[in-house]
Amino acid sequence: MKNFLYLIYLLLLMACLLTPLLARAETDEISWSIQPRLTAGLMNYRFEYGFNAPNANQSSQTFNDYMPFMTAGAMLTYNNCFADTYFQQSVTGKDDLENKPGTELTFNTNNEFDRRDYALTLGCQAHKNVLFFAGYKAGQTDIQMASTKNWHYERIDESGTGTAEFESDGFFIGAAYTYPFGKGLDERLLSVKVALAKLDAEYHQHNSITRNNRAVGDGSTTFDDDWFLSGNTLGWTAGVSLTDRISFFKNHLYYRISLDYFDYDFDVDSAYLGITPVGNAEYEMKESMFSLQLQVFYPFQF
């Protein structure tokens, strides 16, 4: 319901911004185009969560790696306005952790994860070099975990597996400035953009742990647990891009090189272990991504 209200608000805001532009467009020649595109890139993705409870050590978990990704998308333009959508999928990343032998506790953790995102954006050119946009975005990180722990002095062995999902979605609004340079067929476009996003997020983790106390000798025991965190944030995104024509395809095929970054620090408003609320602790969820990508697109004019 909350996201639906945000959508209504953004649609009304966009209508206020675009009405004079669309009215002006009625007096101009109508121009339609559709621009399918493919993108390849490399992202540095980082997700972390943690807690700090009274009378307990601070605990945190981080998933971070460089991951190639592919994106498919398309933009529909009508005079000075556009609608854009895309879907993005990364390959699997890894983030392993182990400590050195010789300590009382020896552990080894293997984490694998991938990331996918999609978005829908509406916007209009308000000035020759300035455009405003708003839209909806969503992302999901799927995580697979495996770990072993050995307490040598207490003679306890523990192994565990886990799965986790981090999901976020919400709405954003932003602006972009484009600076053209060069002349004629050699004209290039340098663009910068910033956006503010209001996102909700949920993190769910299921663990299955097997423990064997060799000092007691009563065999191994297995138990499961589930963690659930939810929160929200008001975060930002920024990017810069360079667009140029691929000369040997005449005037129709273009490429774009872009750098993008977002940083979201979520305020956790609820935490559960199983179905039991967990209090008296400070929780955090953070997500950031830096990406370098190359797009190739072809505009079809109508």
Image: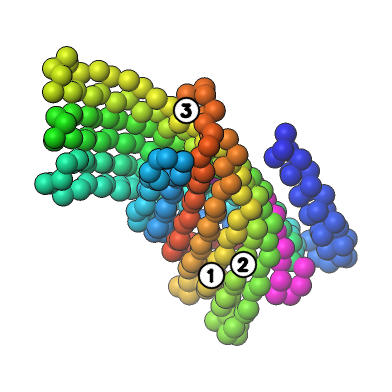
Quarter-wise, where is residue 223 in the image?
top left
Which amino acid does the dot numbered 1 rest on? Answer: Ser
How far apart are the two marked residues, 1 and 3, measured between alpha carbons?
Answer: 44 Å
Numbered disc in front, either 3 or 2: 3
- At mark 2, the secondary structure is strand
**Horizontal relation, residue 28 to residue 288: left or right:** right
Residue 40, position in %: x, y? 42, 57
Q: Which residues are magenta?
A: 126-141
**Horizontal relation, residue 272 to residue 147: left or right:** right
Within-10-Å neighbours for mark 2: few <14, some 14–19, many 20+: some
Quadrant (top left/top right/bottom left/bottom right) for the N terminus: top right
**Residue pointed to by mark 1:** 241
Numbered disc in front, either 1 or 3: 3
Relative to 170, is 205 above or below?
A: above
Quarter-wise, where is residue 148 in the image?
top left
- At mark 1, the secondary structure is strand
Quadrant (top left/top right/bottom left/bottom right) for the C terminus: bottom right
Numbered disc in front, either 2 or 1: 2
In this view, which residue lies farthest toward the front? Answer: 55
Residue 119, position in %: x, y? 59, 48
How far apart are the two marked residues, 3 and 2, measured between alpha carbons?
Answer: 40 Å
CB contact under 8 Å: marks 3 and 2: no
**Residue pointed to by mark 2:** 193
- At mark 3, the secondary structure is strand
CB contact under 8 Å: marks 2 and 1: yes
**Residue pointed to by mark 3:** 273
Tag shown at residue 112: none
Residue 189 or 302: which is nearer the viewer? 189
Residue 149 or 200: which is nearer the viewer? 149
- Nearest to N terminus: mark 3 or mark 2: 2
